[in-house]
Image: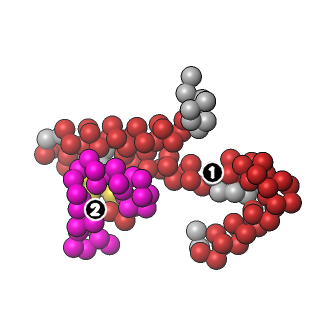
């Protein structure tokens, strides 16, 4: 199976969801496109991977060539929204503290005391940055 290639298929499913949603968005006519949910461009640019996929499929300067990026919005298929949310949840799950996947990786790499130190540093940084 794919487990030995990619231990967490959630990333793969999120990326496929974004790709399929963007392809569906491209294939819609004007009335179908206007019926899609509207998202702020800032939300779509949160993930570098998702933003790069949007730029690659919908064309260059789709997200970056906007005059007023703070108030700009864009119609996207719900699959795109689900894929971006999945990527964000997976990114949170990979933070190295506690019993998350990232915490288990840091425990395997640094041992118990090293993982506690890495977890503390991560929590302090997240708190300081306001994430």
Name the element at disc 2.
loop
Q: Say whether residue 46 is visible.
A: yes
Residue 70 part of the magenta-drawn span? yes
Residue 39 or residue 52, whichever sits in front: 52
In the rendering, which numbered label is found on residue 63?
2
Name the N-terminal-most of marks 1 and 2.
2
Compared with 68, 92 (above or below) is: above
Compared with 41, 26 (above or below) is: above
Looking at the picture, the colour scheme in use is secondary structure
**From the viewer's perspective, is 94 left or right of 69?**
right
Q: Residue 38 location, x and y as percent?
A: 29, 55
Residue occupied by mark 1: 93
Residue range in magenta is 43-72
Q: Within 10 angstroms of label 1, few (less than 14), some, or many (20 or more) residues?
A: some
Q: Say whether residue 82 is visible.
A: no
Compared with 40, 3 (above or below) is: above
């Amino acid at each position: 199976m794919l487990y030995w290639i990619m231990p967490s298929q959630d990333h793969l499913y999120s990326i496929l969801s974004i790709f399929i949603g963007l392809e569906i968005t491209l294939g819609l006519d004007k009335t179908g496109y206007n019926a899609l949910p509207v998202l702020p461009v800032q939300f779509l640019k949160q993930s570098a991977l998702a933003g790069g996929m949007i730029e690659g499929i919908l064309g260059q300067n789709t997200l970056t060539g906007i005059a007023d990026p703070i108030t700009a919005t864009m119609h996207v298929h719900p699959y795109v929204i689900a894929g971006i949310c999945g990527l964000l949840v997976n990114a949170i799950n990979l933070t190295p503290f506690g019993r998350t996947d990232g915490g288990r990786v840091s425990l395997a790499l640094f041992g118990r005391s090293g993982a506690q130190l890495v977890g503390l540093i991560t929590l302090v940084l997240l708190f300081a940055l306001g994430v």
